[in-house]
Image (spheres, rainbow, N blue to C red):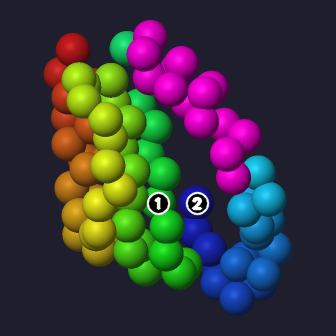
Amino acid sequence: MTIRDLKKYTESLWDWGFLDGCFKRNFEALVKTGLWTVLVMWGKPNEPESYLLMDGRPGRPEIKSCDRTEIQFIVSTWFEIVDGR
């Protein structure tokens, strides 16, 4: 997908903040199946600042700081793992 007008695109995005807290149990249940990975990011458009990765590994997931390079690494690594199965 190519975004031709970033300003129009970002202005049309919903602010999903009003749903904070609604999905926690559902996300955790999906992750526990071992079939889903959930990546939640915070930051400005195209400028991720932090993320939470829930991938079913033991332990409690933590919010970590990041940049675009870190998110690209996480996503590309996920695809390498999934494609390698």
Q: Is residue 46 magenta?
A: no
Please state, as top left, top right, bottom left or bottom right, where the N terminus lies in the image.
bottom right
In the displayed structure, 33 sits above or below 14; it is: above
Q: Amino acid at mark 2?
A: Met
In the displayed structure, 25 sits above or below 8; it is: above
**Residue 63 lies in what quarter of the image?**
bottom left
Q: Residue at x 43, y 46 (%)?
A: 39
Residue 52 percent coordinates (x, y):
39, 50
Residue 38 percent coordinates (x, y):
46, 37
Label ID, residue 1: 2
Q: Main secondary structure of the magenta part?
A: helix
Query: Which residue carries the number 1 mark?
Result: 41
Magenta residues (range): 20-33
In the displayed structure, 50 sits above or below 10; it is: above
Q: Residue at x 21, y 14 (%)?
A: 85
Label ID, residue 56: none
